[in-house]
Image (tube, rainbow, N blue to C red):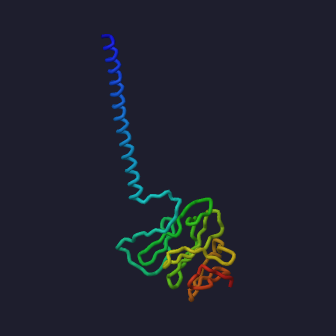
């Protein structure tokens, strides 16, 4: 009989341990389900609101509201510090405001100069990359191609002094004049040569 009692008590202890483990597993199961529910919710929010880490830059369509008047003129628009090209109800993000200490494509501290070509195909803009920069980098956005080009000569990208020297003038023939430089062609105004 003593053996019977020992085996029963050992069996009872195992049952209690199993019951505790089962109860503990149920508690963890609930916690895991709650964590998964939050995770699914956050992922859904990121997808729904298209949130990103902000380190990547790409052009994106911004839908226009139907009440606004459509225009076929190409123009530069600043919204909350960001630069957009706008034509015919379509907007493209060209450069995003940022107070970065290092120069990085697609970001600017200021945009002192913008001008559209007479044929509304190209938009010239000059971005001051950082707050302490005294020059701006020249770019041309081709609306038809949806491409941003660096304004270059044979030595590389052309920079302009921030202020009066940064002004750009589109000539009647569609070429861009920037200080001592002028476009080689009206079809590729980003290719410059000294005058």
Give the position of the C terminus as an image quadrant: bottom right
Residue 43 vertical position relative to residue 23 in the rendered view, above or below: below
Q: Is residue 63 left or right of residue 137?
A: left
Nearer to us in this view, 174 or 185: 185
Above or below, 169 relative to 26: below
59 w.r.t. 17: above or below: below
Residue drawn at the location 39% of the way across and 43% of the way down: 35
Q: Is residue 42 visible?
A: yes
Is residue 149 positioned above or below 11 on the image? below
User: Residue 139 appears in which quarter of the rendering?
Assistant: bottom right
Q: Nearer the viewer, residue 126 or 17?
A: 17
Please indicate, yes or no, whether residue 113 appears anywhere in the rendered image: no
Quarter of the view holding residue 112: bottom right
Quarter-of-image position of residue 111: bottom right
Q: Position of residue 47 (x, y in %)?
A: 40, 58
- On-image quarter of the N terminus: top left
Q: Nearer the viewer, residue 111 or 32?
A: 32
Question: Where's residue 8, x and y in %?
Answer: 31, 18
Residue 145, percent from left and from top? 50, 77
Q: Is residue 123 left or right of residue 51?
A: right
How many numbered discs? 0
The residue at 37%/71% (across/down) is: 65
The single residue placed furthest to the top in the displayed view is: 2
Q: Residue furthest bottom?
A: 173
- Residue 87 appears at what percent x and percent y? 45, 77
Identify the residue at horizontal 62%, vertical 60% (top origin): 102
């Amino acid at each position: 009989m003593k053996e019977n009692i020992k085996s029963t008590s050992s069996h009872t202890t195992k049952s209690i341990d199993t019951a505790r483990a089962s109860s503990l597993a149920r508690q963890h199961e609930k916690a895991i389900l709650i964590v998964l529910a939050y995770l699914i919710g956050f992922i859904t929010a990121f997808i729904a609101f298209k949130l990103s880490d902000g380190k990547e830059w790409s052009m994106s369509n911004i839908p226009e509201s139907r009440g606004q008047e459509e225009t076929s003129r190409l123009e530069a628009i600043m919204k909350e510090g960001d630069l957009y090209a706008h034509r015919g109800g379509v907007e493209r993000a060209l450069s995003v405001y940022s107070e970065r200490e290092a120069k990085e494509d697609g970001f600017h501290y200021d945009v002192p100069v913008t001008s559209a070509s007479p044929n509304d195909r190209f938009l010239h803009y000059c971005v001051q990359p950082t707050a302490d920069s005294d020059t701006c980098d020249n770019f041309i956005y081709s609306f038809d191609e949806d491409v941003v080009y660096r304004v270059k000569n044979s030595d590389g990208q052309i920079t302009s002094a921030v202020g009066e020297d940064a002004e750009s003038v589109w000539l009647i023939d569609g070429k861009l004049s920037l200080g001592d430089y002028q476009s080689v062609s009206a079809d590729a105004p980003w290719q410059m040569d000294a005058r």
